[in-house]
Image (tube, grey):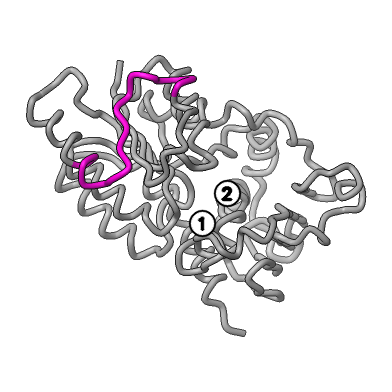
Amino acid sequence: MKNFALIGAAGYIAPRHLKAIKDNGHRLVAALDPSDSVGIIDSYFPDADFFTEFERFDRHIEKLRREKSDRRVDYVSIASPNYLHDAHIRFALRVGADAICEKPLVLNPWNIDALRELEREFDRRVYTILQLRLHPAIQALKKRFASAPPAPGAPIEVELSQISARGNWYAYSWKGEEKKSGGVSTNIGIHFFDTLIWIFGPVRGFEVRVADSDRSEGVLELDRARVRWKLSLRFRDLPESCRLSGKRAFRRLIVAGEPLQFEDGFADLHTACYAETLAGRGFGLEEALPSIELAHRIRTYKP
């Protein structure tokens, strides 16, 4: 049984990490969040120590390490705001733990270079959550198209739409600040960019046609595919059927004229990603880098 600590225990995505740790047969020994709205922990690890101040959390984790306690932390799971990921990964490595970090692993590609050096220095590993790679429908798509030869003159046509309608609160949170979240292309797009690069090969070029704080659109040229993407936080961009039914999220992926059905099967992907990581098959720095590079280039694009 491995011991975990969790940073960002009050966040939206934290329950998936808690479930993944428990479902894989391990335990949470400590958690951190500036907010104390973390009653969800009771459903998974009521005996975990909890901190609202990083300094006290740091001291506790270090104490467990130095005492060689049976609660010494093996992994630090990171579900904090995007702009803090880099610092929290560094913390994990310094206390002798491996890091399992939510997307995006970091906001800037050069941060990966520094983390490589720290991996070597502390003999620890950094992993990220690229759970879409484990979705059965995505894996079937990979099997179907990944072996297709590059076809510059006749690329596979792909259409990606991801609309996650957000309320007024979004603009006032860290997610609404591009320097903290990476903007819409990073915050809601990076999983799909990773998936498409994984399936269709490296980026050959791209064009950004819309670059607003709540919407991003463009064309992406990959080794074997041409992708038209649309990412939006606007309620009015949802299809009418979603608006009428009260749904606030819509995703669509059309490949070579065929819609991909992958609305189901998301619930346990974090658990599967943890299982792969703990089995030594996790997604590390090199797997994360291509989509981070692309999201950064889209964010800083100048026509």
Q: Is residue 15 above or below residue 220?
A: above
Q: Is residue 50 magenta?
A: yes
Q: Is residue 13 above or below residue 217?
A: above
Residue 238 position, x and y percent, is 82, 55
Q: Residue at x 26, y 52 (%)?
A: 116
Q: Residue at x 38, y 23 (%)?
A: 279
Q: Which residues are magenta?
A: 42-58
| Residue 199 left/right relative to 47 | right
- Which corner quadrant of the image does residue 79 belong to? top left
- Residue type, numbered disc 2: His
Residue 34 position, x and y percent, is 37, 46
Q: Residue at x 69, y 67 (%)?
A: 215
Q: Secondary structure at mark 2?
A: helix
- Which corner quadrant of the image does residue 154 belong to? bottom right
Q: Secondary structure at mark 1?
A: helix
Q: Where's the C terminus, which quadrant? A: bottom right
Q: How many marks?
A: 2
Nearest to N terminus: mark 2 or mark 1: 2
| Residue 294 left/right relative to 161 | left
The answer to whether residue 251 shows anywhere in this view is no
Q: Is residue 11 above or below residue 114?
A: above
